[in-house]
Amino acid sequence: MFHKLLIANRGEIACRVIDTCRRLGVATVAVYSDADRAARHVAMADGAVHIGGALPAESYLRGDKIIQAALETGAEAVHPGYGFLSENPDFVEAVETAGLVFVGPSAKAIRAMGLKDAAKALMEEAGVPVVAGYHGADQDAALLATEAQKIGYPVLIKAVAGGGGKGMRLVEAAKGFADALASARAEAMGAFGNDAVLIEKFVEKPRHIEVQVFGDGTDAVHLFERDCSLQRRHQKVIEEAPAPGMTPGMREAMGRAAVRAAAAIGYKGAGTIEFIVDASEGLRPDRFWFMEMNTRLQVEHPVTEAITGVDLVEWQLRVASGEALPMRQAELTLTGHAFEARLYAEDVPRGFLPSTGTLTHLKFPHGARADTGVRAGDRISPYYDPMIAKIVVHGATREIALSQLRRAITGTEVAGTVTNLTFLGKLAADPDFSTGDVDTGLIGRKLTHFQAVDPPPGRIRALAAVAAAGLKGAGGFTLWDPLERTIHVDGDTPFTAILQVYGPGRARVLLDGEVFELTRGPEGWSDGHPGRALRIGDSVSVFAEQTWSFDIPDPFAVNSAVAGGNLIDAPMPGLVKAVFAEPGQKVSAGDRLAVLEAMKMEHALAAPRDGVIADVLVKAGDQVEAGAALVRLKDEAE
C-alpha cells in the first residue's frame, strides 16, 4: 500500500478519497486553486499545494503542476477522482513517466473507450450487445441524414467524445435533423474540441442501467447494477441500486456483458459499463445495449458501496499498489437497497440555473450518508460544478430505503443559496418513481409540476414571522419590547403578520384571519408539527416539508425606480462565451443575444421583447458578475 497519495481533484470526491486514506493510514496531499484556498478538502488533507488560478484551465486541468506537486511532496501515487483529468490518457502517461502510479486504468484502456464510435465497434467484437446506429468516420451532413433515415426516427445525435449530455440531441423527425446536427456539433466542439457525432436509434421507453465493474488487469468482476434513469437533460439526479424490477436472468446477462467489456481492454481499476434498456415490456435479457464505458470512479458509486459493503476507493488503492482483486465474483453479494440524491445549488423554477452564495447554514440528518466538499461558511463558486452534497441512504428493501430518502431530504437544511431540495423531495414522492416505473423521460414529462413554486402555507409564514422578530429566549421579548408587534416579511410571497407574546415561550401569530399558536422548545419555536425557522442576518429559512426562504426588509431602505424590460443581464457570475447582438440590430422576443458559461454549463440569454439593440456592453471572453448588464434595448418610446 502507498504511504502518501496526491488527489488531483477537489470538492466532495477529494474529501471522499481522504476518508478512505485516513482509515488505511495513507497520508494525503491536496491541490487547490485560488478559489479553493480555504476549501474543506484542503483542510482535511495532511498537506496541500497551490496549483493556480480559479479557472480549471489554470489549476485542476494543469497536469504538469499536479505532477510537480506530487514529486515535491513525496507522493507515490495520484488519484484523479472524477472529472477534470480522470479520463485523460496523456495525463496518465505523464504521471507514469514521472515515476508515479496512476490510480486508475491504463492510458490504452482509456483511449479504447474514449470515443463512443470506436468503443462501440470494440464492444461488437467482444460480443457485447450494441444499439443500432451509425458509428462511421464519414461525417458528411447529407450522409448522416441518410443514415438517420435508415435507422428510423426518432434518433439520437451524440458527440463521439466526452459525456454529460453535451453534444447530444433527440431528433423526432427528418425535418429537424439538420438544425439538431448543427447544434450538437457546435456544442461538442466547444466542450471537447471534437465535433464528430454518431447516430443511434432512440429507445422509446429508455432506462439507463449501468454495471459497476472492477479489474486488476488480468481478471474482472462486476458489483451489480445501478439504475440512473431519473435524469434531467441527460444529467443524473437520483440513482439507486439495485435497479427496480431487475430479474436474476437479466442481472446475469448484463453482468456477463459488462465483464466481457472490461476484459476486452484488460481493464484495471473501477469502471462503469453504461447500458440503455428498452423497458417497454419490462426488463428482458434481449433488450439492453452498450452505450459507453466510464473509465473512472462514478459520482454515484456510494449506492454500490451500500449494497455490497465494499469500499471502492480502497479497492482502487489496493489494486493500483499491485494487489489482485480483493474478492471474486462468487464472494460478492447484494444486500438491501440504496438511493443517492444529488443536492445542487441551483434555481429550479428559473430553469435549473446554477447558483452561487455563501452557505450560511448547512446541516445533514442523522442516519444518512452525506458526501460533501463544503461546510457552513463556505462559498459556492461560479467556477466549478455547483454540487453541495450527495445524500445516500440504505435500507433492507426499496420501500424502506425510499422512506429513508424522503426523510433525509426533508431533514437536510441549507441556507445562503437556493437549492434543488424541494425538487428532490417532489421526485422522491412521485407515484411513478415510488413504484419503480421509471425511465429517462419521467422528469421531462412532469417538469411543470416539479418546477412549480408552492406558496408557503400559513404555519410556515407564522414560523417565519417569529424568526424575523428575533424571538430567542423562553422569556419572550425584553422588558422594553411591546407585547404585540407588526412583522413585515419579504420574498417571493411577502406578507404582514401580528405577533403577540403572552407568556414564557408562548406566542401567537395573527395572519390572514388565522391564528397560529406557537411554543418554544429545545429546537426553537414550533406549532406542534415538524419544522423550524432559522434567522441569519436579514433572511429567514424555514425547514419543514421543504425549505422556504424569506427576506427581512430594511425599514430604512428607499425604493428606486429601475428601467424595465430594456436590460439583458447576467443571471449568475460567468464567462461570456459569445455575443450575437450589435447596436442598431432589430431583434424579436426570444432571439438569442449572448451565451454565458457558468459552472460547466452554457446558458443562452434571449431578448425579452421585440426591439432594437441600443448598446452591447460586453464582448466574448469577458468575466461578469451576477446582475451585470450585457445588452441594452432601446426604450420602446425611442
Image: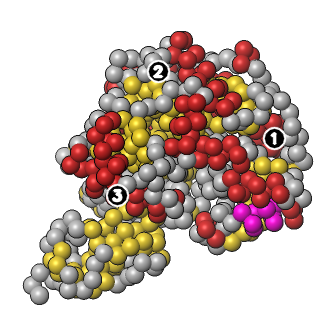
Please name the residue that numbered disc 1 is placed on. 320
Instruction: Indicate the quadrant where residue 437 lies.
Output: top left
Indicate the quadrant containing the C terminus: top left, top right, bottom left or bottom right: bottom left
- Residue 291, numbered label: none
C-alpha span from label 2 to label 3: 35 Å
Could you tell which of marks 1 and 3 lies nearer the N-terminus?
3
Please name the residue that numbered disc 2 is placed on. 244
Q: Residues within 10 Å of mark 2 (few under 14, many from 20)?
A: some
Q: Disc 2, disc 1: CB below 8 Å?
A: no
Can you say whether 470 is above or below 506 in the image? below
Please name the residue that numbered disc 3 is placed on. 183
Question: In the image, what residue type sits under mark 3?
Answer: Ser
- Which one is closest to the eye, mark 2 or mark 1? 1
627 left or right of 208?
A: left
Q: Secondary structure at mark 2?
A: loop
Question: In the image, what residue type sits under mark 1?
Answer: Ala
382 left or right of 619?
A: right
- Which one is closest to the eye, mark 1 or mark 3? 3
What's the residue at 54%, 65% (across, down)? 383
Question: In the image, what residue type sits under mark 2?
Answer: Pro
What kind of secondary structure does the magenta stretch mostly adopt? Answer: helix
Q: Secondary structure at mark 3?
A: helix
The magenta segment is 63-70
User: Residue 589 versus residue 407: which sits nearer the camera?
Assistant: 589
